[in-house]
């Protein structure tokens, strides 16, 4: 296998940095470049892999040279466009200067009135663009004097075909030569432009390595944002629900999803319509509240530990150890079907699944009015029943109507099963 002349890790590191933060999609000032960034990451991954696998050595056919230039142009264009959008400056290179100098000397031999100032090097970027245009982009009309200052006024160049190394016939002594045949409307006949394939590779490699500047730019944006975010902490003197809302606001400013926090707030603020459910529901709500300090710690220390699943996520999806084989199916349909807090037929499927699910242990803990309760209350009661059943299986069967508090009962049962 050929050695990689383009380092795949450069593209991987850029992708990893971009994917490490939601700032590039969430921040309005950066979002406009998000799709370009994704396109560059995906395109470069394929281009780098292809060039490494197929063009360690010079192309052996004319078609291979055209293919090489097509992929090389995608790479060069990607990095240049990305750095332009990121306002990152870089210096031009001179890897192609010797080929350019030989090319200009040949032009002088063909054009007697050729001006001396045409010797000034136009730079690798412009010369590569000229080669790219005549190789495949528009070989029938290359005439931009603005970009190609060596052209005469009104001069147009054309290229009937390209050369691979097997067609090399020149005294320039170029190693691994590739090139193209050029016509002009300013002189008769044709002339060859030969370039060292290794020089073109070095130029392409230098452009690809500029992606490191884009990675540094992205890392700086993240570091600056995280410094700003780290200055704000959750106010622990508030109520548990207020702490959740504070954490939600902080995460929204970090462009992080708050779905589980939204659900927790909605369940905690939901009132029972049946007094008989209050005791059981309050116990479940206390369980949710007990997870809030840990969640707040994770939010405040986001740069150290903000990992999924969060404690709140676990509390919002309690699952008894021993369940029916359809448990996951039923609960997923209940949670997805009973969205929001609406009442009525809009959540018909979710309500139907909840009715079927409640034929089991749910009715031992809560009473659900599937036709008149809100979607939020039904979700709350289903979660309550699952939570209590989970604890009952662990510590012994109980019912929320017992005189002692459920927590006291669990503690008592736990002492009985634990070795002394």
Image (spheres, helix red, strand yellow):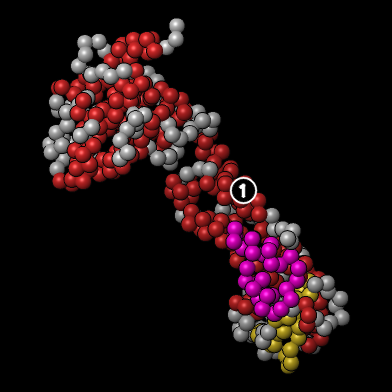
**Quadrant, the N terminus:** bottom right
Please tell me which residue is depicted at 41% across the width and 22% down the height of the picture: 293
The image shows residue 391 at horizontal and vertical percentages of 33, 22
Span highlighted in magenta in the image: 44-71
Residue 63 in the magenta stretch? The answer is yes
The residue lying furthest to the top in this view is: 420
Which image quadrant: the C terminus?
Answer: top left
* Vertical side of 179 occupied by 389: above or below: above
In the image, residue 236 sits, relative to residue 270, either above or below, namely: above
Position of residue 176 measured from the top left corner of the image (x, y, whole percent): 80, 72
Identified at 59% across, 61% down, the residue is 46
Q: Is residue 206 above or below residue 148?
A: above
Total labels drawn: 1
The answer to which quarter of the image holds residue 188 is bottom right
In percent of width and height, residue 378 lies at 21, 34
Residue 145 visible in rendering? no
Residue drawn at 23 percent across, 22 percent down: 280
Residue at image location 67% in from the left, 60% down from the top: 207
In the rendered image, which quarter is residue 102 located in? bottom right
Residue furthest left in the image: 372
Residue bearing mark 1: 13
Is residue 293 visible in the rendered structure shown here?
yes
Q: Dot 1, how many residues are within 10 Å of its Cα: few (below 14), some (14-19), or many (20+)?
A: some
- The verdict on residue 145 being magenta is no
């Amino acid at each position: 296998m050929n050695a990689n002349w383009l380092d795949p890790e450069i593209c991987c590191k850029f992708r990893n940095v971009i994917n490490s933060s939601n700032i590039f999609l969430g921040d309005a000032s950066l979002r406009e470049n998000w799709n370009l960034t994704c396109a560059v990451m995906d395109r470069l991954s394929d281009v780098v892999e292809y060039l490494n696998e197929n063009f360690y050595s010079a192309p052996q056919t004319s078609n291979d040279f055209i293919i090489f230039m097509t992929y090389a142009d995608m790479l060069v264009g990607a990095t240049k466009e990305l750095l332009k959008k990121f306002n990152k400056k870089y210096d031009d290179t001179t890897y192609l200067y010797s080929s350019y100098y030989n090319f200009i000397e040949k032009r002088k031999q063909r054009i007697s009135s050729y001006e001396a100032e045409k010797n000034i090097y136009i730079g690798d970027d412009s010369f590569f663009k000229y080669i790219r245009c005549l190789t495949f982009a528009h070989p029938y009309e290359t005439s931009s004097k603005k970009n190609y200052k060596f052209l005469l006024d009104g001069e147009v160049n054309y290229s009937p075909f390209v050369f691979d190394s097997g067609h090399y016939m020149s005294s320039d002594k170029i190693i691994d030569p590739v090139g193209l045949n050029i016509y002009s409307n300013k002189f008769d006949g044709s002339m060859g432009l030969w370039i060292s394939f290794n020089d073109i590779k070095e130029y392409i490699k230098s452009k690809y390595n500029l992606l490191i500047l884009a990675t540094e730019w992205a890392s700086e944006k993240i570091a600056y944002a995280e410094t700003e975010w780290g200055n704000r902490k959750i106010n622990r003197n508030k109520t548990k629900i207020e702490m959740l809302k504070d954490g939600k606001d902080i995460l929204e400013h970090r462009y992080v999803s708050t779905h589980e926090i939204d659900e927790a707030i909605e369940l905690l603020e939901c009132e029972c319509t049946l007094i008989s459910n209050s005791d059981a529901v309050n116990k479940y709500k206390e369980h949710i509240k007990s997870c809030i300090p840990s969640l707040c710690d994770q939010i405040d220390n986001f740069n150290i530990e903000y990992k999924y699943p969060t404690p709140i996520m676990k509390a919002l999806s309690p699952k008894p150890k021993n369940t029916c084989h359809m448990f996951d199916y039923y609960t997923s349909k209940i949670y997805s079907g009973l969205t929001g807090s609406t009442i009525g037929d809009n959540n018909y499927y979710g309500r139907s699944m909840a009715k079927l699910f409640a034929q089991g242990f749910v009715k031992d803990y809560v009473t659900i009015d599937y036709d008149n309760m809100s979607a939020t209350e039904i979700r709350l009661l289903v979660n309550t029943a699952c939570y209590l059943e989970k604890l009952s299986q662990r510590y012994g069967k109980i019912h929320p109507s017992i005189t002692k508090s459920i927590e006291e009962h669990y503690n008592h049962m736990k002492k009985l099963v634990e070795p002394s």
